[in-house]
Amino acid sequence: MIKIYRDHDDYVLQNLNRIIRVQGFSLDALFQANNPVDYLTPFFEATESEPLEQNSAPGEYPWLAPIENQEIWAAGVTYMRSKSARMEESEQSGGDHFYNLVYEAERPELFFKSTGSRARGHLAPVRIRKDSAWNVPEPELTLAINSAGHIFGYTIGNDMSSRSIEGENPLYLPQAKIYRGSCAIGPCLTVGNVLSPQTKISILISRLSEVVFQGDTSVSQLKRTLPELSAYLFRENEFPCGAYLMTGTGIVPDAGFTLHSGDRIQIQIEGLGVLENEVE
């Protein structure tokens, strides 16, 4: 298992107890490689390890999002909890029926989420829309898919969402999902491991040092398989530099909860680390 952290000037790679800081590394090249592990191996052979103690707490460092020219897409209504939340928020507008249909349909809901320039990294601020009164984070297992359409790695995603705008009309989904500071991924890209269906996904939101929401789910609660979601994304489409795909959320706060400026969001996925962001 290799973890890839993006710094301001270069990349830091970690493999068990070895940590190296490398020059000439390219995420675009990694996403274009037929075998990503083969692309990574020469960097460890040619570079001396840094002292482990200097990087023993990667969660405390503000890593950039591990992205170059990849697009970030997202899947919706892939968990039962997500379906019920979407139906709840859109009931008044009459759009609730569509979310039930897409949950049961063969074709998943897929939508564009972010470019690399809009994506925030670990410890960077995320935002809530000023024209929205009901905003939540959505913790999501995020797939790294190479240019050939093969899943080769994972990261943690935070799909910031405006429930009030999406609930007003399903056609407002792009405005509810795509805006400045609405996406965070990190703290690193993990390559070379296969996640168990029992992998736990959890979130903790604190306000003024007090926990105001927490919840968890597992990958096993996904209605669709990861290869299925990946295959639909690449159907009749191409991604020369690969893509990230957020796989939906199984954790949605109750209707009475909304994010406030200053809230701290911590999303943890077993084996991948913790992605932390403060609401701007």
Image (cartoon, grey):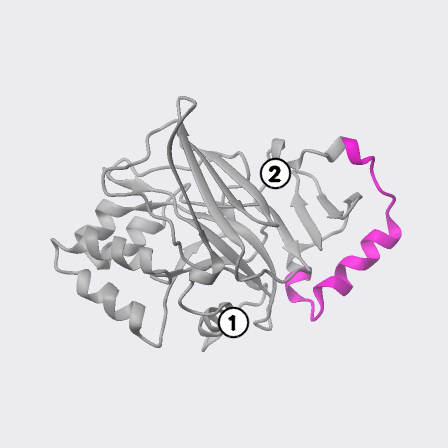
Q: Amino acid at mark 1?
A: Pro
Q: Can you give x and y, in whole percent of width and height, for residue 83 in the image?
A: 29, 59
Secondary element at tag 2: loop
Residue pictured at 73% horizontal, 47% vertical: 13
Q: Quadrant of residue 94?
A: bottom left
Q: Which residues are magenta?
A: 30-53
Q: Is residue 165 left or right of residue 123?
A: left
Q: Is residue 32 magenta?
A: yes
Q: Position of residue 56 (x, y in %)?
A: 72, 34
Residue indicated by mark 2: 63
Q: Position of residue 172 (x, y in %)?
A: 24, 54
246, 252: nearer the viewer = 252
The tag on residue 105 is: none
Q: Amino acid at mark 2?
A: Trp
Examine the residues drawn in magenta and state their main secondary structure. helix
Q: Nearer the viewer, residue 257 or 214?
A: 214
Q: Residue at x 38, y 45 (%)?
A: 160
In the foreground, 8 or 182: 182
- At horizontal 46% and vertical 77% (from top left) the residue drawn is 235
What is the spatial separation of the Cα atoms under label 2 and label 1, in whole angstroms?
Answer: 28 Å
Q: Which of the two residues, 142 or 127, is positioned nearer the viewer here? A: 142
**Disc on res. 227:** 1
Sequence-first disc among 2 and 1 = 2
Q: Is residue 117 magenta?
A: no
